Amino acid sequence: MRSWLAENPPYTARIEEGDCMRAQAVGQIVASRHPDYPEGAHVHGMLGVQTYAMIRPGPTPPQQLTRLDLDLAPLPAHLSALGSSGMTAYFGLLDVGQMHADDTVVVSSAAGAVGSVAGQIAKLYGCRVVGIAGSADKCSYLVDELGFDAAVDYKQGDVYSALSRHCPDGIDLYFDNVGGELLDIAMLLLAKRARIVVSGMLSQYNATAPAAGPRFYGMLLLKHARMEGFLAADYQEHYAQARVTIAGWMREGKLRSREHVVDGLEAFPEAFPMLSDGRSFGKLLIRV
């Protein structure tokens, strides 16, 4: 959302003053003239920050609508573990990151919507998983409830020393949701043929000056490592099968989805900064 307000958004049209803020949402159809989307059906789409959306369904956003199967999971999960957050974690690890069962995986912003799912999927595949989060409560949640092997509070102490202790053989896969200083530290600890998956840039979304690039990118050369960014939308044709897989893990109690729900459309201006200031815990949603 921050990038959509910029003068030149990197991958989509700018949102102008007076426009409805673009946002993914799930909802129930209350009136329809389309045979594939009957009244009462639940759908997912780029429906915006508004109480009602009028849309002519089409093959691409913003007209693209997906019928939801609530037998797979409750409605909020279709915006978190079964939504773009879960898809980012799933394809980022398995396709972009080429994750292996014996990898040491480190996840930044690990208590967030993407990071928490990424860490759990890595554990399901037999990896050693270390999360980086911004409070003692979040670190305890990662280890005690989600099964991470260790967690590091970046606001307390020496992150480099803590990661070195928890990753004695180096980092095989760094799932980066943050960029900035944490990325620099992770680069110094890369193992041979490591992979860095660039999922987000949380440290830069509110920057008021051009961000500095990675200081230690020479480690990519020395460690024969690879760094690659991606967008979950690249994998839309595979979403349906990924949702079935993730929902199966959820039913079996192997993966948890946590949502931070704020009530009321009028709460949006106050809730929006929670995406970047650490107050949200899990996928931040507004219930209308």
Image (spheres, rainbow, N blue to C red):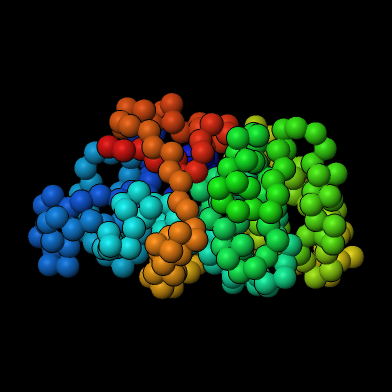
Q: Position of residue 88 (x, y in %)?
A: 52, 59
Which residue: 79% across, 49% down? 163
Which residue: 24% across, 38% down? 51
> In this view of the protein, can residue 153 be seen by the observer?
yes
* Quarter of the figure with residue 251: bottom left
> In this view of the protein, can residue 236 be seen by the observer?
no
Check the image and report above or below for 261 versus 26. Answer: above
Which residue: 12% across, 56% down? 39
Check the image and report above or below for 208 versus 241. Answer: above
Closer to the camera in the image, 229 or 175: 175
Q: Where the C terminus falls, by quadrant? A: top left
Q: Position of residue 122 (x, y in %)?
A: 61, 63
Q: Position of residue 201 (x, y in %)?
A: 63, 47
Which residue: 43% across, 38% down? 260
Q: Residue furthest right?
A: 222
Q: Position of residue 57 (x, y in %)?
A: 24, 61
Q: In this view, does 95 lie to the left or right of 32?
A: right
Closer to the camera in the image, 242 or 60: 242
Closer to the camera in the image, 259 or 53: 259
Q: Is residue 243 left or right of residue 216?
A: left
Closer to the camera in the image, 145 or 243: 145
Q: Is residue 32 left or right of residue 236?
A: left
Check the image and report above or below for 178 versus 73. Answer: above
